[in-house]
Image: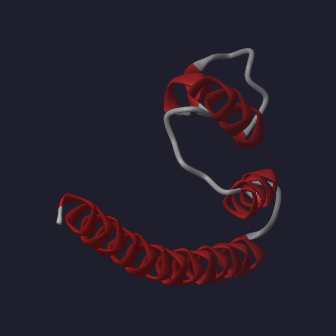
Amino acid sequence: MSINLNDVDIKGVYEAFTIAYKKYKDEINLSKDDYKILSDFFKTIGECDAVTQEKVFTVALENLNLNYIDANNEANVNVKMYRTLGISIGIMIAIFFI
């Protein structure tokens, strides 16, 4: 994104974000919600006064934090499921060998 911002043809932060996201989409793991939050955030950067910018930062951080908590909870559920699945498959293989 920073390289795109140095280009004189880029009109703003949002355009630089969009180009960088399209280029590195497969290398970064952003959910649709994360992308929407960041997209909305970068649309407003530089277009408001300092007080509004601070509010936008706060809202974006809160939303990203909520998404992080949800992703962490989902990961914990999946870890338990895969552990149980691994143990079950191991027991099943042991029973086949007996």
The structure's colour scheme is: secondary structure
- Count of all numbered marks drawn on residues in the image: 0
* Residue 65, x across and y down, in percent: 55, 80
Residue placed at 70% from the left, 80% from the top? 59
Quadrant into which the C terminus falls: bottom left
* Residue 21, x across and y down, in percent: 65, 35
Q: Is residue 2 left or right of residue 49?
A: left
* Residue 40, x across and y down, in percent: 80, 59
Taking the view exactly as shown, the residue that stands out farthest to the front is: 98
Q: Looking at the image, which is closer to me, 64 or 29?
A: 29
Up-down relation of residue 95 to residue 23 (above or below):
below
Residue placed at 51% from the left, 24% from the top? 3
Residue placed at 66% from the left, 57% from the top? 31
* Residue 57, x across and y down, in percent: 64, 73
Up-down relation of residue 31 to residue 85 (above or below):
above
Would you identify the image quadrant in which residue 76 lies? bottom left
Residue placed at 71% from the left, 54% from the top? 35
Up-down relation of residue 84 to residue 22 (above or below):
below
Up-down relation of residue 66 to residue 20 (above or below):
below
Quadrant into which the N terminus falls: top right
Q: Looking at the image, which is closer to me, 21 or 14?
A: 21
Q: Looking at the image, which is closer to me, 75 or 6?
A: 75
Would you identify the image quadrant in which residue 64 lies? bottom right
Q: Looking at the image, which is closer to me, 7 or 40?
A: 40
Q: Is residue 91 left or right of residue 76?
A: left
Q: Is residue 3 left or right of residue 84?
A: right
Q: Is residue 80 left or right of residue 34?
A: left
